[in-house]
Image: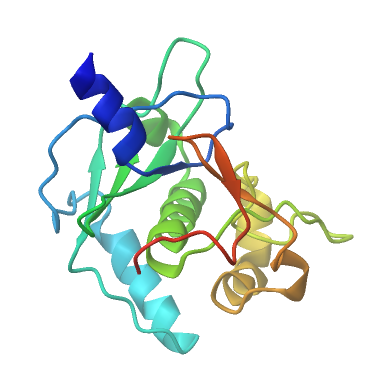
């Protein structure tokens, strides 16, 4: 029980899920391991970041398939975990991944990378066309993403003013809600 309590209060977990979850990550991770399935998308993210004037450091990042769901009703598809020692792990739910289009796969990985590497928080703002950001808490339709990819990537790397300070991100380990400006995540 002491070990479980230790992980509940010391492992910072960032996820695209609700604040009411008690998610505990007790796995040991090897940082800088990227499953080959994700490699082309991560290379695309690095390329797009460069086009938009951002340098991306992948040295402390791992992206793997893993158990991301707690219970039968959980629909989490992926999450980013930041370790207290500086590593970052993105875990993706493999059964759901296999059912996704390439557009949803790219969107999911870009979303989680933006959490981990750029400190981006969720943004559920809408325009007259639809969602403003890949950082929406729900995956966008494949067609919408495909039709608006350029604008969505511009917003991802050059945060829209509508997405600054309007949303919060849940630190699900201790239930604290942090605004984007006071959330302490290593970059």
Relative side of 40 to 77, left or right: left
Q: Position of residue 101 (x, y in %)?
A: 48, 43
Quadrant where the C terminus sits is: bottom left
Q: Position of residue 127 (x, y in %)?
A: 84, 61
Q: Nearer the viewer, residue 166 or 59?
A: 166
Q: What colour scheme has been applied to the protein in the rendered image?
A: rainbow
Quadrant where the N terminus sits is: top left
Q: Nearer the viewer, residue 98 or 54?
A: 54
User: Number of labelled discs?
Assistant: 0
Relative side of 160 to 99, left or right: right
Residue reaching furthest to the front: 2
Residue at 66% x, 73% y is: 151
Residue reaching furthest to the right: 128
Q: Nearer the viewer, residue 16 or 64?
A: 16
Answer with the quarter of the image where residue 129 lies: bottom right
Residue at 30% x, 40% y is: 11
- Above or below — where is 80 with respect to 27? below
Q: Position of residue 144 (x, y in %)?
A: 69, 54
Q: Position of residue 67 (x, y in %)?
A: 29, 26
Residue at 19% x, 23% y is: 3
- Above or below — where is 168 with respect to 77? below
Answer with the quarter of the image where residue 68 lies: top left
- Above or below — where is 80 with respect to 22? below
């Amino acid at each position: 029980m002491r070990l479980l309590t230790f992980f509940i209060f010391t492992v910072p977990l960032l996820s695209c899920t609700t604040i009411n979850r008690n998610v505990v990550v007790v796995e040991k991770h090897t940082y800088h391991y990227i499953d080959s399935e994700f490699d082309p998308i991560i290379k695309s993210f690095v390329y797009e970041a460069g086009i938009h004037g951002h340098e991306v450091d992948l040295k402390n990042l791992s992206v793997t398939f893993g158990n991301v769901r707690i219970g039968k009703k959980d629909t989490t598809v992926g999450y980013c975990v930041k370790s207290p020692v500086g590593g970052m792990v993105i875990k993706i739910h493999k059964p759901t991944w296999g059912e996704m289009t390439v557009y949803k796969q790219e969107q999911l990985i870009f979303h989680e990378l933006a959490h981990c590497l750029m400190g981006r928080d969720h943004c559920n703002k809408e325009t007259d066309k639809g969602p403003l950001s890949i950082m929406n808490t729900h995956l966008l339709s494949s067609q919408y993403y495909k039709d608006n990819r350029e604008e969505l990537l511009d917003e991802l790397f050059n945060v829209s003013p509508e997405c600054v300070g309007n949303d919060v991100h849940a630190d699900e380990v201790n239930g604290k809600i942090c605004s984007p400006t006071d959330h302490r995540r290593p970059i």
